[in-house]
Amino acid sequence: MSASDQARSIVAPTSMMRRIAGALVIVYAIVTMIPLVWIIATSFKTPPDSIAYPPKIVFTPSLEGYVNLFTTRTRQSPEVLAQLPAPTTWYDKLVRSRNMVIAGPSNVVPRFVNSIIIAFGSTFLAVFLGTLAAYGFSRFRVPFKDDLLFFILSTRMMPPIAVAIPIYLMYRQLGLNDTKLGMILLYTAVNVSLAVWLLKGFIDEIPREYEEAAMIDGYTRLQAFRLAVLPQAATGIAATAIFCLIFAWNEYAFAVLLTSGTAQTMPPFIPFIIGEGGQDWPAVAAATTLFVVPIFVFTLLLRKHLLRGITFGAVRK
């Protein structure tokens, strides 16, 4: 065996190690997917099946949870139900079978739209401002740069409850309580520190020669940044956007304190989906399932950038 073969055999994992690693990855994936699969399955159960003990693995699928999620219902006596016209739709029949009638739509659609506007709006602003700040820290001599970067990072370490009351009082004075603009500005302020730190690492890996060549050709600094740096940093921008979106999409503490109706998002709305006679678990599971879909789709579309962004700059020549 040659020296190169020996070196390769030492570095490369054996077939046994590959099988063990593959088995561990599969087990980990299954364990992490079980809660999500269970939530999705619960959204298609009836209320009695959702609280059955032992839990039902095999059940007859029902859309009652989704009907209850998108509608508000009132319980009626059999005498009142007998005087009503016959139900004309399948969901009317489903609600009537529970001795209830549909009173109108629920608030889930406005809350879902609020989540989309606030999460994506704050993510765009955080990534935009973070990219500019990271480029400045990476390319220019900024006085007390290390201290400023540490200060920016320290804002991320602060627990939300520590600043919740001051922010509430400030927002009340400014008229930003329960407004989409107020939540977008707040989430942007929280996420911009993460964006600066992540994007500075990506921009540091981009050679300055790209910009210098562009400026020699007659481009301005801003044009060189747009044409030479941004395309190279697209991977890092996508990865940063995913992390910022996940935080803004799932944030609960500020949403509970600062919103109550007009700008309320899905996280504080989901726990308060109360049905007649107790917690409507199929409706809660249906809301959770729909809540996961946008972030899952967004991450799926940018998965290649996310994987490349996490490993970007890990191996240096």
Image (cartoon, rainbow, N blue to C red):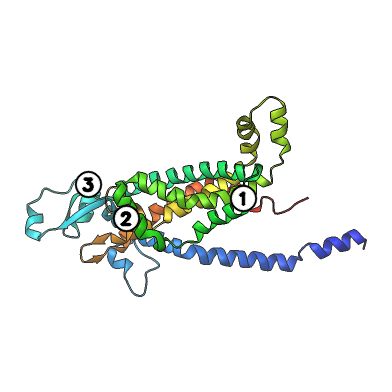
Q: Nearer the viewer, mark 2 or mark 3?
A: 2
Residue 130 seen in render: yes
**Label 1 to label 3: alpha-carbon separation:** 65 Å
Residue depicted at x 21% and y 50%: 92
Instruction: Please state if 105 lies on the left or on the right of 25 as rendered.
Output: left
For the residues labelled 2 and 3, the Cα–Cα distance comes to: 48 Å
Q: Which mark is residue 89?
A: 3
Image position of 308 with respect to 220: above or below: below
- For the N terminus, the image quarter is bottom right
Which is in the foreground here, disc 1 or disc 3? Answer: 1
For residue 284, which quarter of the picture?
bottom left
- Label disc, if present, on residue 169 of the rendered structure: 2
Residue at the disc numbered 1: 145
Name the residue type under label 1: Lys
Query: Which of the marked residues, 1 or 3, is nearer the chain's N terminus?
Result: 3
Amino acid carrying label 3: it is: Thr
The amino acid pointed to by label 2 is: Leu
SS at mark 3 in the image: loop
Q: Are marks 2 and 3 in contact (CB under 8 Å)?
A: no
Mark found first going from the N terminus, 2 or 3:
3
Please report whichever mark, 2 or 1, sits nearer to the chain's N-terminal start.
1
